[in-house]
Image (spheres, helix red, strand yellow):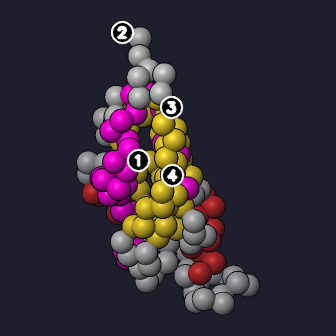
């Protein structure tokens, strides 16, 4: 069994506020992924005002509804103490904590083993878009055999 370990930082393009499907952007930045027969991809976003989640990858209305729901759960304009970077700053931190900044996804036969309708979202919680860095760590094997 030949182990594969790889780590790189994937810089995601700046996007406006909302939930954005980034699965393809992440996969395209990780050529080592195709070598792995069985393994794990760990994603860790290095920011406190955005988050990662896995959800519906087909209907873009799901992403819009997610953003609308987050806005109702953690509204701007509440009486927050932390406003150093603007009205959207503290709500962005709270939303990031709600969804989290890390996910681990199985790799099977060189592909992410997501469900049929699952994709990786970058959820941008600030009004102005920023580039976001995601540390991607691959661990696995090139010749592991899966049960039939």
Measuring from the top left, give residue 120's x and y in whole percent.
40, 51
Question: What whole-number distance in Å separates the C-alpha atoms at marks 4 and 1?
Answer: 24 Å
- Give 64 or 36, whichever is nearer the viewer: 36
- Crowdedness near tag 1: few (<14), some (14–19) or many (≥20) residues, C-alpha within 10 Å: some
As measured in the structure, the alpha-carbon distance from the residue carrying label 4 to the one carrying label 3 is 13 Å
Query: In front of the other: label 2 or label 1?
Result: 2
Asked if disc 2 and disc 3 are in contact, CB closer than 8 Å, the reply is: no
Q: CA distance from mark 2 to mark 4?
A: 30 Å
Going from the N terminus, do you reach mark 2 or mark 3 first?
A: 3
Mark 2 crowdedness (10 Å alpha carbons): few <14, some 14-19, many ≥20: few
Q: Which mark is residue 148?
A: 2
Dot label at residue 55? 1
Residue 91: x %, y % from top left: 59, 74
At mark 3, the secondary structure is strand
Image quadrant occupied by the C terminus: top left
Q: CA distance from mark 2 to mark 1?
A: 28 Å
Instruction: Give SS at disc 2.
Output: loop
**Residue contact at pointers 3 and 1, CB within 8 angstroms:** no
Q: Is residue 134 above or below residue 13?
A: above
Tell me whether the residue at label 4 lies in contact with that at label 1, contact meaning CB atoms closer than 8 angstroms: no
Closer to the eye: label 2 or 3: 3
Q: Judge from the rendering whether residue 138 lies leftward or rightward of residue 101; answer left or right.
A: left
Number of marks in picture: 4
Task: Point out the tag, 2 or 4, that comes first from the N-terminus.
Answer: 4
Q: Residue at x 36, y 35 (%)?
A: 35
The region drawn magenta spans: 15-44
Q: Earlier in the sequence, mark 3 or mark 1?
A: 3
Left or right: 135 in relation to 110: right
Residue at point 26% right, 51% down? 59
Instruction: Tell me which residue sits at (41%, 47%) in the image.
Output: 55
Which sits in the foreground, 18 or 72? 18
Q: What number is the disc on residue 7?
A: 4
């Amino acid at each position: 069994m030949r182990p594969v370990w790889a780590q790189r930082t994937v810089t995601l393009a700046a996007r406006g506020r909302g939930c954005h499907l980034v699965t393809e952007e992440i996969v395209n930045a990780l050529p080592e992924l195709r070598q792995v027969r069985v393994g794990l991809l760990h994603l860790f976003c290095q920011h406190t005002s955005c988050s990662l989640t896995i959800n519906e990858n087909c209907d873009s209305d799901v992403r819009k509804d997610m953003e609308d729901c987050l806005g109702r759960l953690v509204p701007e304009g509440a009486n927050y103490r932390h406003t150093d970077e603007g009205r959207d700053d503290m709500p962005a931190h709270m939303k990031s904590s709600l969804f989290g900044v890390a996910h681990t996804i199985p790799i099977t036969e060189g592909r992410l083993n997501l469900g049929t309708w699952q994709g990786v979202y970058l959820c941008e919680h600030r009004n102005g878009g920023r580039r976001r860095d995601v540390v991607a760590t691959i661990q696995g094997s090139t010749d592991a055999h899966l049960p039939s």
